[in-house]
Image: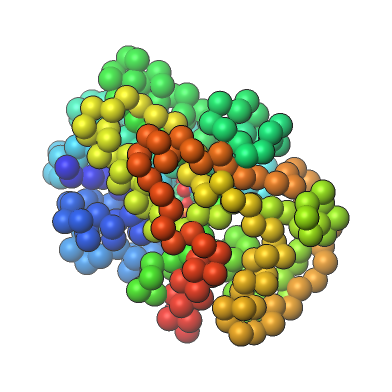
Amino acid sequence: MRVLVTGGAGYIGSHFVRLLADEQIESVVLDNLSAGHRDAVPPNVPLVCADVGDRGAVRALLGEYQPTAVVHFAGLIQVGESVRAPDLYYGVNLVQTLAMLEELTRGGVQLMVMSSTAAVYGVPQTVPIPEDHPRNPINAYGATKLAVERALQDWERAYGLRHAALRYFNAAGAHPSGTLAERHDPETHLIPLAIDAAIGRRGALTIFGEDWPTEDGTCVRDYIHVQDLATAHLQALRRLEQGAPSMTLNLGTGRGISVREIVDSVQRVSGRQVPVQQGTRRQGDPPRLVACASLAAEALGWKPQRSEVDQMIEDALRSRLARE
Ligand SMILES: NC(=O)c1ccc[n+]([C@@H]2O[C@H](COP(=O)([O-])OP(=O)(O)OC[C@H]3O[C@@H](n4cnc5c(N)ncnc54)[C@H](O)[C@@H]3O)[C@@H](O)[C@H]2O)c1
């Protein structure tokens, strides 16, 4: 197996590339470095710096490295920005992905794993959320991911491209070595924001609503360690390689953690206070988003190993401090 990893210089992609290297599986990264970091890609892994929609670059890469599978992490990831600039999100996440798909088909690549998201469900009608829950995305980000999922189904029927669409809930944590980290700019994710507030690298953490219908009034999410995500991708690739049919799977733990619980954990693990300020509810924020996680366990034989909350925070804090 030789794997093309798009977005391999980004947060989740770089952890996956590291896992492939640990497993002695060859990879090549395609990333335009709009949000990724060159130093997150191991020096012995080729990095092609181009857009996934750059057909010439994709064609040249396929010719030179002859990958047998693609894991597609590249894309734009900010929900709020996608509402303000849907053209950007459709352009990158959908149009560029379709251009790449055409080149992959032409180049004879038969297997693909893609980063999808819990945002395809929109406001959930039932929690935990099973994969067959209605898909009603409420922002352009979720809509573009759902559109790619549907395109992959059509591609499979027409061209035989088998795929795994993996719907992550909230990725968290970092490589246990501290050498890879979540480095988004701007950072919108709760855990790195809470850690930075604790270590005095930014001001108080805003909690968006403490009057939600949840146990402690704050929003509840399903956090999954980035290493566990990486492992699930590898297991999905291996299943596809063995001939498994295409699959659509939630990747989460099935356990909800509230914003308050995250703050408590950051305080426990760091030994510092997290200064917080009360904000108002954000429009479109569901109070509770938790995966029904049994299908991935069944289909992949996958079980999260590092997704206990204190473990995720400990790993995230270590990698944050390593960047000081
Ligand atoms: N982080 C999460 O909690 C989460 C949850 C659900 C789904 N996802 C999905 O997982 C994937 C990876 O997320 P992440 O958190 O690692 O984000 P990230 O921003 O760290 O990584 C995305 C990478 O894609 C690259 N990229 C963006 N547009 C590109 C383009 N047109 N051509 C080539 N490269 C491009 C960026 O430079 C970056 O390295 C995304 O598709 C995201 O939608 C993430």
- What residue is shown at x 74% (from left), y 47% (from top)? 287
- What residue is shown at x 51% (from left), y 35% (from top)? 145
- What residue is shown at x 46% (from left), y 35% (from top)? 295
Q: Can you give x and y, in whole percent of width and height, for residue 59 in the image?
A: 23, 37
Going by the image, does 10 lie left or right of 268?
Answer: left
**Residue at far top of view:** 158
Going by the image, does 208 lie left or right of 261?
Answer: right
Residue 97, can we see it? no
Quarter of the image where one finds residue 278: bottom right
Q: Quadrant of the N terminus?
A: top left
Q: Can you give x and y, in whole percent of width and height, for residue 86 in the image?
A: 62, 38
Residue 60 versus residue 175: which sits nearer the camera?
A: 175
Residue 176, can we see it? yes
Q: Is residue 8 above or below residue 193?
A: above
- What residue is shown at x 76% (from left), y 63% (from top)? 207
Q: Is residue 157 above or below residue 311?
A: above
Q: Is residue 160 above or below residue 67?
A: above
Q: Can you give x and y, in whole percent of width and height, for residue 319 in the image?
A: 44, 75
Q: Can you give x and y, in whole percent of width and height, for residue 174 in the image?
A: 44, 66
Residue 278 versus residue 202: which sits nearer the camera?
A: 278
